[in-house]
Image: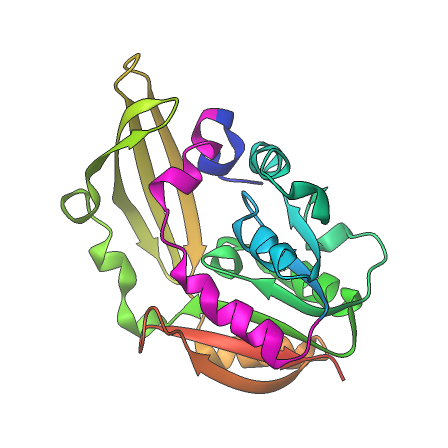
């Protein structure tokens, strides 16, 4: 199930304006080129930023996301016709044969349930051609990123075209083992509406991820550092034999 910030149409429309700097995607674009990929599956494509970045550079792209509101935002963007958009998730994909499957940003951690995570790994494996790669990132639990998720650090007011001033911040709701729950709050100055969205992320240890990949048939080629968060994230590169 998609979080409210992705599934609610008013919040989905805020996703790009509130996060305009997507320099984190540069590393994924570089890897698509490094691996000689031509066909890419973007799992958890959201509002389509990475999928369209790829399509603009000549890649064949399939974007899948469980949040219909985000998919609709993606479909309305210029050039969206070059991408095959799917409302759903990686557990129930149509027959595909791609060179690369990606999960950027928080996507892998947002798949918090063990069953959904196993299904995602199986779905990506089935979509990859032999020799194709799955690339995704996840925060290192040892960096304890959740300690920085406070209203004091995150509060801001953003002027959003078509929506006016939007006040936003995040609060940490709780930590229970590897599960971290946070709550985003959005206040629309135009009409005073207040919307909240809770997210639960799973912080998986590196060894756990290695076991999961091996159990689903992947060969782990490399664990890289994330250029935008050095020393704080793992970037897994796994291959279908």
Whether residue 128 sits left or right of residue 34 in the image: it is right
Q: Is residue 203 above or below residue 212?
A: above
- For the image shown, how many numbered marks are present on the structure? 0
> Which quarter of the figure has residue 43?
bottom right
Q: Residue at x 31, y 76 (%)?
A: 230
Q: What secondary structure characterizes most of the magenta part?
A: helix
> Residue 60, position in %: x, y?
73, 59
Left or right side of 156 for 132: right
Magenta region, residue range: 10-37
Residue 97 location (% of width, % of height): 82, 66
Above or below, comparing residue 11 to residue 241 in the picture: above
Q: Residue at x 56, y 37 (%)?
A: 70
Q: Nearer the viewer, residue 135 or 209?
A: 135
Task: Give the vertical position of 61 relative to 9 (above or below).
Answer: below
Residue 115 image point, x, y percent: 64, 57
- Is 30 in the magenta? yes
Say if residue 194 shows up in the picture: yes
Where residue 149 sits in the image (x, y, percent)?
24, 51
Can the viewer see residue 44? no
Residue furthest left as drawn: 152
Q: Quadrant of the C terminus?
A: bottom right
Magenta segment: does it hold 52? Answer: no
Q: Is residue 168 above or below residue 38?
A: above
**Which residue is at a point 68% across and 78% down the rendered structure image?**
36
């Amino acid at each position: 199930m998609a979080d409210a910030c992705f599934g609610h149409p008013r919040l989905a429309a805020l996703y790009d304006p509130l996060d305009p700097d997507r320099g984190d995607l540069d590393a994924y674009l570089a890897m698509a080129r490094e691996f000689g990929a031509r066909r890419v599956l973007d799992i958890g494509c959201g509002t389509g930023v990475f999928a369209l970045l790829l399509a603009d550079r000549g890649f064949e792209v399939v974007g899948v996301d469980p949040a219909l509101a985000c998919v609709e935002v993606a479909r309305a963007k210029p050039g969206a016709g070059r991408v095959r958009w799917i409302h759903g998730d990686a557990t129930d994909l149509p027959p595909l044969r791609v060179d690369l499957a990606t999960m950027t940003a928080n996507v892998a951690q947002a798949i918090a349930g063990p069953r959904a995570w196993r299904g995602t790994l199986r779905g990506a494996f089935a979509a990859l051609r032999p020799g194709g790669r799955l690339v995704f990132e996840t925060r290192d639990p040892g960096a304890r990123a959740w300690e920085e998720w406070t209203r004091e650090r995150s509060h801001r007011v953003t002027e959003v075209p078509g929506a006016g001033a939007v006040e936003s911040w995040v609060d940490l709701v709780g930590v229970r083992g590897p599960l971290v729950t946070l709550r985003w709050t959005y206040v629309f100055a135009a009409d005073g509406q207040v919307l909240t969205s809770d997210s639960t992320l799973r912080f998986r240890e590196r060894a756990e991820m290695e076991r999961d990949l091996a159990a689903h048939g992947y060969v782990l080629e490399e664990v890289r550092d994330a250029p935008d968060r050095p020393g704080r994230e793992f970037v897994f590169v796994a291959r279908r034999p």
